[in-house]
Image (cartoon, helix red, strand yellow):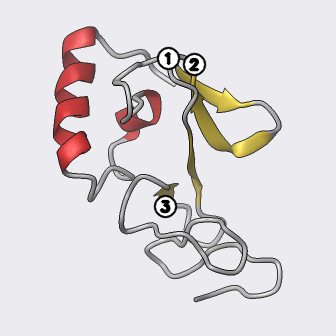
Amino acid sequence: MKTLDRDTAKHLFEFYRKHRDGIRIKSEMATICLICGSIHVTPKDGDDLMLICFNCGVDFYRYECKACSKTIDGRDPQNPGCRVCGLRICTCGVCGCPAVDTH
């Protein structure tokens, strides 16, 4: 993940904190925590689908859809949680459930 400068990170944080639609499309948002604004976000140990903020400890889903390769971000309202498996549902309709492929 590419490191952002402080001003860019602050601008993105302020915008996406209020307007979460489309956060999945902005690749830079993978490195910004929407809780505290920190840019100290890295992959979570033991879970390759999640990222974690080292500043406040919040973790969130951000990964590539196995069906269409689009980015899924748990902070984006267009990627709601699946009621069956808990993963996020992609905008293509796939969540990754072992038993059910679409919702």
Q: Is residue 97 left or right of residue 92?
A: right
Q: Residues within 10 Å of mark 3 (few under 14, many from 20)?
A: some
Structural distance between the alpha carbons of marks 3 and 1: 24 Å
- Residue placed at 48% from the left, 78% from the top? 92
Mark 2 or 3: the one toward you: 2
Which of marks 3 and 2 precedes in the sequence? Answer: 2
Per the image, the residue denoted by label 1 is: 40
Q: Nearer the viewer, residue 71 or 7?
A: 7
Q: Mark number for residue 54?
A: 2
- Residue placed at 45% from the left, 66% from the top? 79
Q: Residues within 10 Å of mark 2 (few under 14, many from 20)?
A: some
- Residue placed at 47% from the left, 53% from the top? 73
Q: Nearer the viewer, residue 24 or 41?
A: 41
Give the number of callouts.
3
Q: Quadrant for the C terminus, please.
A: bottom right
Mark 1 or 2: the one toward you: 2
**x then y, percent, for residue 98:** 82, 78
